[in-house]
Image: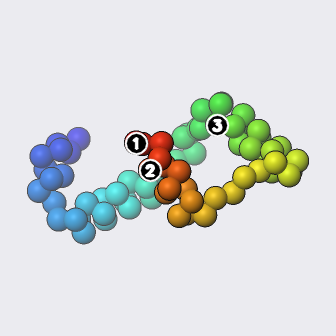
Amino acid sequence: MIAVSDIKKMSVSERLQTIEALWDSLRSEDSVDSCAWHGDVLRARKAKVEAGEGVFLSISELRTRLQRSAS
């Protein structure tokens, strides 16, 4: 395993390339399953949208909401 101190020595470009390689390696794995509750949340959100009750935010609206909740 690579040490955090070794990662910190890498350039930003090298770190981004490493992240990309890690994501690519995870995508090719069939054994990575989501938690069961993820499906429950997605089904609930889909039902809300289909019922016309879904609320959609722009990126700027989301940022504003997150900034307010962080204060």
Asked if marks 1 and 2 touch (Cβ < 8 Å), the reply is: yes
Q: Is residue 40 or residue 45 the one in the foreground? A: 45
- Residue wearing tag 3: 38
Where residue 42 is drawn, which disc sits there?
A: none
Asked whether the viewer can see residue 27, the reply is: no
Residue type at mark 1 is Ser
Q: Which residue is drawn at 65% across and 31% down?
A: 37
- Residue wearing tag 2: 67
Asked if marks 3 and 1 touch (Cβ < 8 Å), the reply is: no
Residue type at mark 2 is Gln
User: x and y percent of residue 43 in the render?
Assistant: 77, 40
* Quarter of the view holding residue 30: top right
**In the orientation shown, which residue stands out farthest toward the top?**
36
User: x and y percent of residue 11 in the render?
Assistant: 17, 65
CA gap, disc 3 and disc 1: 28 Å
CA gap, disc 1 and disc 2: 6 Å
CA gap, disc 2 and disc 3: 25 Å
- The 10 Å Cα crowd at callout 1, few under 14, some 14 to 19, many 20 or more, is few
Q: Is residue 1 or residue 10 the one in the foreground? A: 10
- Residue wearing tag 1: 71
User: x and y percent of residue 22 in the render?
Assistant: 38, 54
- Left or right, 64 with respect to 5, comes to right
- The 10 Å Cα crowd at callout 2, few under 14, some 14 to 19, many 20 or more, is few
* Quadrant in the picture for the C terminus: top left
Q: Which residue is drawn at 69% across and 37% down?
A: 41
Q: Going from the N terminus, do you reach mark 3 or mark 1 first?
A: 3
Q: Residue at x 43, y 55 (%)?
A: 23
Q: Going from the N terminus, do you reach mark 2 or mark 3 first?
A: 3
Q: Which of marks 3 and 1 is in front?
A: 1
- Left or right, 20 with respect to 56, comes to left
User: x and y percent of residue 17 in the render?
Assistant: 31, 65
Q: Residue at x 16, y 60 (%)?
A: 10
